[in-house]
């Protein structure tokens, strides 16, 4: 779009015959990162510091819908309390945006437009350099990237305000000539740029003595204090959690050491038992083994192969045999393939059955008036099995391989 101008104020500023001010190549926003206070971004989780970084990518800033949304939109003096619309346009508008486009050359990475300022007060403030920076009023969506960082998308323009200082910095301003590299020169400018809160702008008057600035600064300091308090509480929770974790790690190490020692002890005992045990079964059995086998399984042949295993199997099939053997195995059938365990159970069970039988014979004629009966005898036998077998089990623990 071209304007008919009759007066050239500078390379970038001209006057129309009516006295309107034309400002060319005004950057209204840029690609990159912007800083917000947590209170301005209630839907974005905070990070470790007092600001939230919002990213703007080229895809978002230069999206066709974004560019079109700013075309023809009004220029305002400072940001209004509400968006500009038909109901307040006459009151708020001091000009319009024209030829919104993607910047090139010195304006690379910026969204650029030409201003037509039609209001006398606004023209005067721009010419006297009171209002040279600009700040966009817009709607957008925000996507959380991680705590303290978000991406801005779906930018839709409503207006552009003339402000003393804007969030995007002095790069987005009205220039008399092609812009050079610009840096914020004072601590006040840096503070305002970081702590701005409405739309894209800081407190519009830029006066540190103003009530607006003081209130803004007070709120910012309170929010910072709240964040520091929350961080202190969070650090304490983290420290407490670390203490619990350290104790759990120490306890786990103790438990692991105990398990390792028990494993070593079991291996030692198993090796000793294996070295001392006799073969579990053999065709020519010695008299002692045959005698014990006869106790467990009366009538078993003396030359039975694996006589210990054979005797235990037959004994376990009987009530008395099962009672004696269960004490050693915890109520389970013996592991017949464990030679060391077979040897211990064979010796212990045969001894407990032999002792029980002797006890039964010794007490067979007794009783209280002939009424003691089989039930009492059976209970006494079972109890004897149990007590004798318990003692035998302690003396000959079964290796669990």
Image: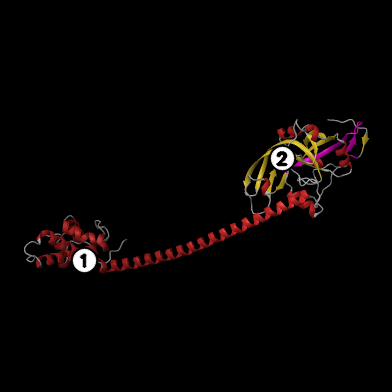
Q: Which residues fall within the magenta stretch?
A: 10-31
Query: Which quadrant holds residue 260?
Result: bottom left
Query: Which quadrant holds residue 307?
Result: bottom left
Q: Where does the N terminus fall, quadrant-wise?
A: top right
Q: Which residue is mark 1?
A: 387
> In the depicted view, which residue is nearer to us: 260 or 160?
160
- Whichever of labels 1 and 2 marks the residue nearer the N terminus, that label is 2
Residue 69 on the magenta span: no
Relative placement, left or right, of 384 versus 125 is left
Image location (x, y in percent) of residue 368: 8, 65
Q: Secondary structure at mark 1?
A: helix
Could you classify mark 1 by the number of other residues whose Cα lies within 10 Å: few (under 14), some (14-19), or many (20 or more)? some
Could you classify mark 2 by the number of other residues whose Cα lies within 10 Å: few (under 14), some (14-19), or many (20 or more)? some
Query: Which quadrant holds residue 295?
Result: bottom left
Which residue is at the far right?
7
Relative placement, left or right, of 185 versus 327 is right
> In the depicted view, which residue is nearer to us: 208 or 123?
208
Q: Where does the C terminus fall, quadrant-wise?
A: bottom left
Image location (x, y in percent) of residue 329: 25, 60
Q: Which residue is mark 2?
A: 58
Q: Residue at x 74, y 47 (%)?
A: 196
Residue 129 higher or lower than 118, as above or below: below
Estimate the spatial distance between the alpha carbons at disc 1 and disc 2, rounded to whole Å.
87 Å
Which residue is at the far front?
211
Q: Secondary structure at mark 2?
A: helix
Relative placement, left or right, of 170 versus 370 is right
> In the depicted view, which residue is nearer to us: 359 or 76?
76
Image location (x, y in percent) of residue 280: 23, 62
Residue 305 visible, this angle:
no
């Amino acid at each position: 779009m071209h304007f008919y101008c009759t007066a050239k104020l500078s390379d970038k500023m001209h006057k129309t015959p009516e006295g309107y001010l034309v400002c060319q190549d005004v950057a209204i926003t840029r690609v990159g990162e912007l800083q917000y206070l947590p209170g301005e971004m209630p839907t974005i989780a905070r990070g470790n510091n007092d600001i939230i970084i919002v990213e703007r990518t080229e895809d978002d800033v230069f999206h066709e819908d974004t560019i079109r949304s700013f075309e023809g939109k009004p220029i305002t003096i400072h940001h209004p309390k509400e968006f500009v619309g038909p109901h307040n346009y006459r009151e708020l508008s001091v000009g319009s945006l024209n030829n919104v486009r993607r910047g090139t050359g010195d304006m690379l990475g910026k969204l650029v437009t030409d201003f037509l300022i039609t209001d006398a007060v606004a023209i005067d403030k721009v010419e006297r350099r009171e209002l040279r920076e600009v700040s966009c009023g817009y709607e957008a969506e925000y996507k959380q990237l991680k705590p303290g960082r978000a991406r801005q998308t779906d930018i839709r323009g409503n207006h552009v305000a003339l402000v003393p200082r804007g969030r995007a910095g002095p790069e987005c301003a009205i220039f008399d000539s092609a812009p050079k590299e610009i840096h914020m020169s004072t601590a006040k400018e840096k503070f305002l740029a970081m702590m701005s809160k409405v739309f894209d702008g800081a407190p519009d008057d830029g006066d540190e003595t103003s009530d607006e600035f003081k209130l803004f600064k007070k709120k910012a300091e309170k929010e910072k204090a709240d964040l520091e308090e929350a961080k202190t509480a969070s650090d304490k929770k983290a420290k407490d959690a670390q203490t619990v974790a350290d104790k759990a790690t120490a306890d786990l190490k103790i438990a692991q050491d105990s398990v390792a020692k028990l494993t070593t002890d079991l291996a030692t005992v198993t090796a000793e038992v294996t070295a001392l045990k006799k073969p579990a079964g053999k065709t020519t059995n010695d008299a002692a083994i045959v005698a014990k086998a006869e106790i467990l399984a009366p009538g078993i042949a003396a030359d039975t192969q694996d006589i210990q295993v054979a005797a235990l199997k037959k004994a376990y099939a009987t009530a008395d045999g099962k009672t004696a053997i269960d004490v050693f195995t915890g109520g389970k059938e013996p592991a017949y393939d464990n030679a060391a365990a077979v040897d211990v159970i064979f010796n212990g069970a045969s001894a407990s059955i032999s002792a029980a039988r002797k006890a039964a014979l010794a007490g067979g004629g007794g009783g209280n008036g002939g009424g003691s009966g089989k039930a009492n005898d059976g209970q006494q036998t079972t109890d004897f099995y149990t007590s004798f077998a318990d003692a035998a089990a302690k003396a000959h623990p079964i290796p669990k391989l």
